[in-house]
Image (spheres, grey):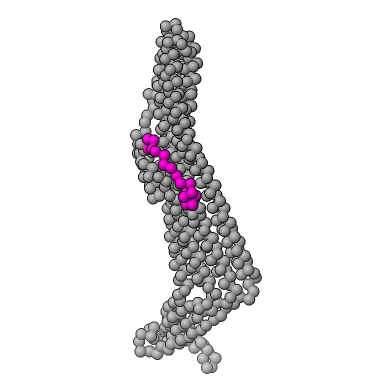
Amino acid sequence: MFRKLIVLLAAPVVVGAQQVTDTTLRPISITEAVRLARENNVSNITASNGVRSATNSVRAARAALYPTLNASAGQTKSAGDRLGQSGQLVPFTGAWTYNTGLTSQLTLFDAGKMFADIKNQQANVTAAQAAEVNTEFNVGLQVKLAYNSILAAKESEGAARAQLEAAQAQLATSIAKVQAGAANVSDSLRSVVQVGNAQLALLTAQNTYRVQSAALTRLVGTPYFVTADLADTVEHPVAPVDSAAIMQMAITGPPIRQFEAQAAAASAAERSAKAAYLPTITANFNYSGNGTAASYGLNGNPFPYSRGVSINLNYPIFNRFTRENNVATAQINLENTQAQVRDARLGAQQNIITDIATMRNNEEAMRVQEQNVRASEEDLRVQQQRYNLGASTLLDVLNSQTALVTARQALIQARLNYRNAKAQIEAVIGKDLP
């Protein structure tokens, strides 16, 4: 019986010896992780390029205020047959003919459409900039959540190691008492189960650590593997937050500014669409010339030039309701974006209230769970001493061990919830909390 017990005892030890620490992971601070993600993450790069594209659209819209200018030049030479005076075909060979031209067009009046288009594109730039900031904080939120999960996994690993050490110590005591005839084999077997459970908890925590480190590496976009700096697991004092100030920042945060800019762009697009109800006036200028064997007018051969200026008015009387449909579409887009702004403000208020409540609840939960951990550690110490003296049963010790494990995991979860709630608030307000 004891040989079988020894085999059971050796199994966890072998498993522990086979664990290898991944030394290729490079620890970085959470500030460094957010900075790297801002530089390397594909979402941030795409959002930055979106600002560049919107800026180019503004330049294109402003260019409509300036006249167009086109230059042309060409030369032709013809040969063949033609009818002579007697109706017979007469061969001929013409000289080179040269031509040059310069044309320009300017829109004099379009009912303010060009200015509305410029304002529309400028609002799109503002929306793209707000989207870039919003994307940065959303990516930062993902980084912080992965970072916090790594810290929680390391804390769980530490708790699992402490659990394993306590289970192994209790197992040694149980074996000694069984050999002395002061306990039965069942005590040893239960202790073996406790050791196995501790080993499984340790393996789970280590696996979570590796998985979350891989996720963090992808988010920060580095060619090397990174992980959280374990110094961040040190308890920092919890800073109080001003709920009113945070609420005000939330309703003017990056997501809200993005929707407001989109609403401004939709309003300008509506004015641009309505400009089609008024006529468009354009001015055209033409300067051209042509001559035979004149080498583009650079030699002494005659090269006559002509000049022309025209002013045109264009008004679509009926274009199959295209104008009306464009106005209706623009109005629908404006109403939708205005509704999105209102909903975004309400959503920000809801999220802030929820996250602040979650953060404060977990502040208190951390305080309570820290007391529970200390009380459970003392209870386990007392029960182990009583068991060693024969004044307590193994069941009492196992219950105390389970209570300690539960208290430690609850403390770790409260810390993780607190960090995540804080990260959620920072993503909504677009600002890091102290």
Q: Nearer the viewer, residue 144 or 46?
A: 144
Note whether residue 273 is visible: yes
Instruction: Examine the rendered structure and indicate whether residue 97 appears above or below residue 35.
Output: below
What span is colored magenta in the figure?
232-250
User: What residue appears at the point 50 percent right and 37 percent down from the top-left corner?
Assistant: 361
Q: Is residue 203 above or below residue 191?
A: below
Q: Work out whether residue 30 or residue 298 is closer to the camera in this orientation and state it.
A: 30
Please give left or right for residue 44 compared with residue 328 in the image. left
* Residue 258 lies within the magenta run: no
359 shown above or below 116: above
User: Residue 84, how many percent across, how many down?
Assistant: 51, 91
Q: Does 241 appear in magenta?
A: yes
The answer to whether any part of residue 211 appears in the image is no
Residue, x 38% and y 42% (percent of image)? 30
Q: Is residue 273 left or right of residue 422?
A: right
Residue displayed at 49% across by 81% down:
284
Q: Residue placed at 62% from the left, 65% from the top?
A: 328
Instruction: Residue 253: give x, y in percent of width and height.
Output: 48, 53
